[in-house]
Every structure is written in C-alpha cells, then in structure tokens.
Amino acid sequence: MIVRSYSGRSVAEALEKVRKDLGPQALIIETRTCKEAGLFGRQTGYEVVAAGEAEGETNAAARSAAPAPVPSQRRPGQLPLPRSGPAHEASQARQLLSAMVPEQTVEELNHRGDLSLEIASIRRQLARLACGHGVPTDHLGATTSQLLEERELPAEIIAECDEVIAKAGGRVPEARRSELLSRYLAKHLRTTAGIDWQQNRMLIVCGPTGVGKTTTIAKLAGDLVLRHGRRVGLVTIDTYRVGAADQLQAYADLLDMPFAVARTPAELGQVVATMTDCDNILVDTAGRSPADGTRVHELKGFCRAVPGMSVALTIAATAGRAEFAAVVERFSLLPVEHCLLTKLDECEASGRLYGCLRRHGLNIAYCTHGQEVPDDFCTADAMSIASRILAPSPQRMSAV
C-alpha cells in the first residue's frame, strides 16, 4: 500500500492523474485546495491524496500465500467491508491512516475544524467504496464543477454536491441542479435573520480593522429607527482612530439619537446608565488586529462593564481562509453571539466565504453590500448566501 499526492488545476485533472498512476481502484483519502506558481502569479489549484498498491506490490501479493484468518477488529458502527476489491483497499487505507494518526490524537483534536472536515471526507470515501462505487464520478457536469472551483468552494464540499446530484438521479436540468445544491448548501449555514432587539437591548460591535464596523453600526441604527421605530443611543469607545467619534456623532445627529464617548469600561457603564430612555444602545469599538491579543483583552473589559451586553463580531466577506480563521480564533476570547457580514458586494470567491462560514459555525445576523446608509443592508438569509455560489455572475442581496 502506498500513499501519494497529486495536484492539478481542477479536481478532475488531479483525479485523472490518480487513475493513471494507481488505477481505478485507488482510494481517495483527501482533496484540498492549494496555491500553485503560474505564469500570472500564484493560482488556486487542487491536491488529491490517494492510496493504492504499486504494481510490484500487487504481483508480490499474488505470489504469496493467503494469510491466516484473524478475528474481526470491527468496532460498533463501522462499515463491514469485504476482503477483496475496492473495499479491501479501503480497509488497508484505514489501517494505514490509523497508524499515521494515533486514535488518542484523533480524539483530542476531533473538535478542530480542519481535522473534522478531513475525517468526514475520508468517511464518505470509505462508505462509497463499501457500496462498490470506487472512485467518485462527476455528476455535477463540467460547467457546474468549473463554476464551484472558480468560486473557491472547498473540494470536500464540491464532493458533497456531487453526491447530492448523484442521489437525485445524476441527470438533472441545470435550473433544478442549482436549486438542489443551493438548498443543500443553505441547510448547513447558521443564520438568525437579524437580532431579537427585545432580548438584546445593548450590542457592542467588534472586529478587525477595516471591516466597516462604524458604517455597519450606522446602518443598524438607521434600520432600528426608520423601519422599527425604536429609540437608539450610540456610544463609541474608539479613541484611537482619528475622526471615528465625529463620524458616528454625525450619524447620531442626522437621526436625532443621543451620542456619547466612553474611554474606559467604567465610563461605558456610566454612559449606559444615562440612556435609560433608549430602547437599544449600540457601541462602536476600535479595530483590533487578530495578532494583537492585548487589545482584544482590553475589549473584554468593556464587554463585562455592563450586565446584559451582547457582542457581535464583524467580518468582511472578502477575508481569505487564513485571515478568517485568525479573526474567529482571536475574538473567541469574547462572548460573541452574532456575526455581521460586511462587503458582500465585493466578494468574488463566494465559495471560499461559504466554506469559512460553515467551518466556523457563526450565527450570521446581518449582511451589508455597499456603502449607502441606511440602505445596502439586510437580515442574513442562508438561501441568499448559498445561491451566490451558483449564480452566473455576482448577485446583489436585497433587504429582507
């Protein structure tokens, strides 16, 4: 048994290399995206890790005597695999993987997103082999497959989409195919269609620099005042950025809302105490770099200053995978309940965004898709986000 890695500009190209090298009985262990050097810089490629038998190993196995039977080591819940054909390959690969990753290590790291996705991908491949399907076939069609790859949808989720179409019969009209996939993808997103403002009277909005927190707060305030008729107070603790307080005060004056600046957690508590006639209070914060743990810890003090303060994390839809993960990890120090997704109109890699949202399981409450205040703002809808991945051109979300 050998394990090799194959790369290509598409999943199909990498799989073709697997078939040529290891044959049609090869076991696909993992698929993932990668960056390859190209004529126009680093481009997105795909890497497939596969297991199979080299020709010499196959001949040697044929000459050797059959091994003595051994008691079954199958655990409850494992698929019973026959001892020949593709299923036998799956069994050998599983033993190889067990040797490579000790069971104790798997249990300790199982809650980490990357490992969980890889394990899920391996399990799907083993299940397909146990049913005699062998290497996955492309039921999506060349056009849909290329579109999903261009939108940078993670390879393991593309494989899931292929299974969805396979279960629907394989030959599905394009319109029906898009509907099936959008519904499947939406089912795995967590959206809250806004925030219950009766239960969340005070909201502090945090996030990294440059994601549009202040503009988003202005949109939230405008929505609450103009559409819901609520009395809103605005507070900023951003004393770092030049003009930050002036910008938010301009919004407050425009909508006739009380406004205040708080420099310490104690001041925040005092300011909130003066806004007893407000239905809701929104607190703007300075941008914190995910690499600056000290600043995030400072923010934790403000979150604790007022009992009942809810926390919303603002993330730009244009963030790359590594940046997205770093933001979520750093701000996990705070009791984040809601996610505000900004710059959706600038996001071209909607598949990459989907993969990040799904991997980190964020509760998406609102989305912004432009600079107009209070417009270009809507409650989050899982179907709308998922549909962007399959749209022939970038979509503009409408208010809900």
Image (spheres, rainbow, N blue to C red):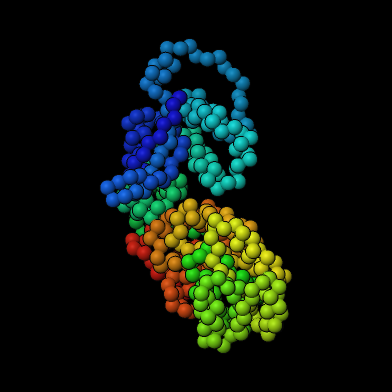
Q: Pinpoint residue 3: horizontal percent, then vertical percent.
A: 44, 30
Q: Pinpoint residue 376: horizontal percent, then vertical percent.
A: 45, 74
* Residue pictured at 55% horizontal, 71% vertical: 240
Q: Nearer the viewer, residue 336 or 121?
A: 336
Q: Pinpoint residue 164: horizontal percent, then vertical percent.
A: 44, 49
Quarter of the image that includes the N terminus: top left
Q: How many marks?
A: 0
User: Which image quarter: residue 364?
Assistant: bottom right
Q: Is residue 382 visible?
A: yes
Q: Nearer the viewer, residue 179 or 224?
A: 224
* Residue pictured at 58% horizontal, 46% vertical: 112
Q: Pinpoint residue 339: horizontal percent, then vertical percent.
A: 55, 64
Q: Is residue 386 visible?
A: no
* Residue pictured at 46% horizontal, 59% vertical: 319
Q: Nearer the viewer, residue 33 or 12?
A: 33
* Residue pictured at 61% horizontal, 33% vertical: 103
User: Which image quarter: residue 2?
Assistant: top left
Check the image and report above or below for 21 versus 368.
Answer: above
Q: Nearer the viewer, residue 166 or 12?
A: 12
